[in-house]
Amino acid sequence: MKWYKFLNNISLLLHALGSAAGYFLIEAISRHSFLAAWEYMTGRPLVFAYNTALIFTTSLLVYLFRRRCFFRILVALFWLTLGIINGVLLTTRVTPFTGPDLHLITDALKIANKYLPMAGMIVVCILFGILCLLLLVLFIKGPKYRGKRKYRYNLLLVAAGAAAFAGVTQLALEKRVLSNYFGNIAFAYEDYGYPYCLATTIFNTGIGEPRDYSEREIKRIENSEKDLPETKEGDYPNIIFLQLESFFDPTLVNYLHISEDPIPTFRKLMKEYTSGYYKVPSVGAGTANTEFESITGMSMHYFGPGEYPYKSILKETTCESAPYVLKNMGYTTHAIHNNEANFYGRRTIFPNLGFDSFTSEEYMPEENQKNVLGWIKDKVLTDEIMKCLEVTEGPDYIYTISVQGHGAYPEEPVLEDPEITVSGSPTEEKDCQWEYYVNQIREMDNFVKELVETLSDYPEDVVLVMYGDHLPTMGLKVEDVDNKYLFQTQYVMWDNFGLKKKDVNLAAYQMAAEVMDRVGIHEGTIFRYHQARRNTKNYQVDLETLQYDLLYGKRYAYGGENPFGRTKMKLGLYDITLDSLQLVSSSDFTYYIRGTNFTPSTEIQINQEWYDTVYVNPTTLMITGTELKDFDRIAAVMRSNSSTRKALSKSYDRSCYALFTENKWKLPANE
């Protein structure tokens, strides 16, 4: 047909127009507004043209196939799906969809039910199935290109297009139309477009080698620290870090009217103890990155845009950290989190950060209360912190990660009788979100009060650092907050032995060094650097070089070797034991299994097969429906609380086992 031939002759032009239209739709979805997408297109035409060219270049691949209609639709759906994912994510958080989010898919699936109801998830699955079916029909029945396929010519066309696009990219960077550094990833997506920023976060990871990197340069940096005093000898205090989920002072939001102060305890502590603003690397999400900075003393500024070291470099190597340094000073190191152990990969990452134990939700008692969104309330953490202090004789370093303040915050009233009411937001839905949020942090503030009162009576010296990991996912803008900065929360450094009050604003990566300095510890390559060089000339430049050497370089600072070995971290503080077995019903083969330190996450394996287990209490489990026979191997194992029900790693869990042989309960040594 003539029109078909004509369309083939102008297919490249149609490709370009289709790419532009598709990209406009993607930005409209991401920005939640066609008007905002139009203003972006007209206000930044060169950036818009570049991102259109990126989509156009990827679509050139269709010329290598006869079923061009199918592959055009497939490429279009690929980009449209990415746009929809970003648009949906930006309804619940400030940070857009990035390359590292691809590594967090398993974590996203675990908490998807908190953001999308089950009915919604079912609808999504059904629509996805229908789409796959339609694509299959299109592939089989759809039109084919019937002209002579000039494969070599088309391959050359695709290669030339890719090469031209690479040249345009380099030119755009040189002329500063684009940037490969994102000081604020959310703003970068708005300025440079979703496709370019997504590609940058996928391919630009890690820390690039500094231009002047050498052994001599590292020695120069180390020599700049020689004025530090020696580490004091004697007893050291217990050091506790408490990272509070999405915690900050909502009275800083200038449009809110809050019926009463939601954080009276935290505010009082800030007036009486060392405190200030706490600079964090993210807004609305990125808990693990604030955690990484606070534990390691390393800045996220030098990593790839949107990168999570927990999902990249820390999966491959150990890393200098406060736990490793303090272990050499006689400390026992603990991590506590009232969420599951597998979230953010902590179960496998924490041994690479030097932790001796990790108490997660699975190892906490069954009476834990949850808020209406299903997050465990933070007040459970007081007992868990005290257990860590009491289980050892020497000083302890305890890193505690809270979860109660987590979103997504409901847009409809869910609290029957809220203690605090909120108004002043642009919409009623936003008022509902803020009201839910401030009532959660009121409870978190009450937890802080209980914890401080408990530690005040503790007979050993304690330093307790408390701070929010990032601002909540409320779509806040700079002009909405009195401090005019979104990348900071607040901290307070409480103690029970009379440290002098010192008000100073700190970055998350500076806090561990500050605490060590206050108690007379001057150890660790990265922490000594912060103590000696903070606020000095070339502080940030030399920090980047040092971080590169410690994580990606030749480790000149360590004499060329990595001195930190992966710890054999224990999950939970106490071992599970199996003590006895009782047959309570022979008709349905119901057994009581008795032991110690069971939790609702403890499940029974028989001959390495999982069996439905009823948790009765911390000393009793029940199984039904299978007769135990001679030489059956019975194991009590902790399992993750996620929907995937993934068992905790056998090399780290506190599982134990027994043999049922000759109608007797035999207890071999634990594996």
Image (tube, rainbow, N blue to C red):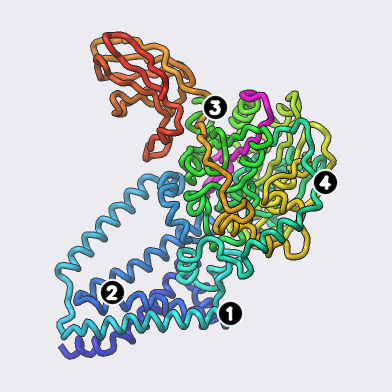
Q: Amino acid at mark 1?
A: Arg
Per the image, the residue denoted by label 4 is 502
Write down the residue under mark 1. Answer: 176
Specify whether 67 is left or right of 578.
Answer: left
The amino acid type found where label 3 is placed reads: Leu
SS state under label 1 = loop
Q: Secondary structure at mark 2?
A: helix
Asked if residue 269 lies left or right of residue 196, the reply is: right
Query: Marks 1 and 3: which is nearer the front?
Result: 3
Residue 258 pos. (x, y %): 69, 47
Disc 2 to disc 4, how far (Cα)? 62 Å
Sooner in the amino-acid sequence: mark 3 or mark 4: 4
SS at badge 3: loop
Q: Earlier in the sequence, mark 1 or mark 3?
A: 1
Mark 2 against mark 1, which lies toward the viewer? 1
The Cα–Cα distance between marks 3 and 4, rounded to whole angstroms, is 35 Å
Quadrant housing the C terminus: top left
Dots 2, 3 in contact, CB < 8 A: no
Residue matched to label 3: 573
> Which of disc 4 and disc 2 is earlier in sequence?
2
- Pointer 2 residue: 72
Check the image and report above or below for 510 versus 587.
Answer: below
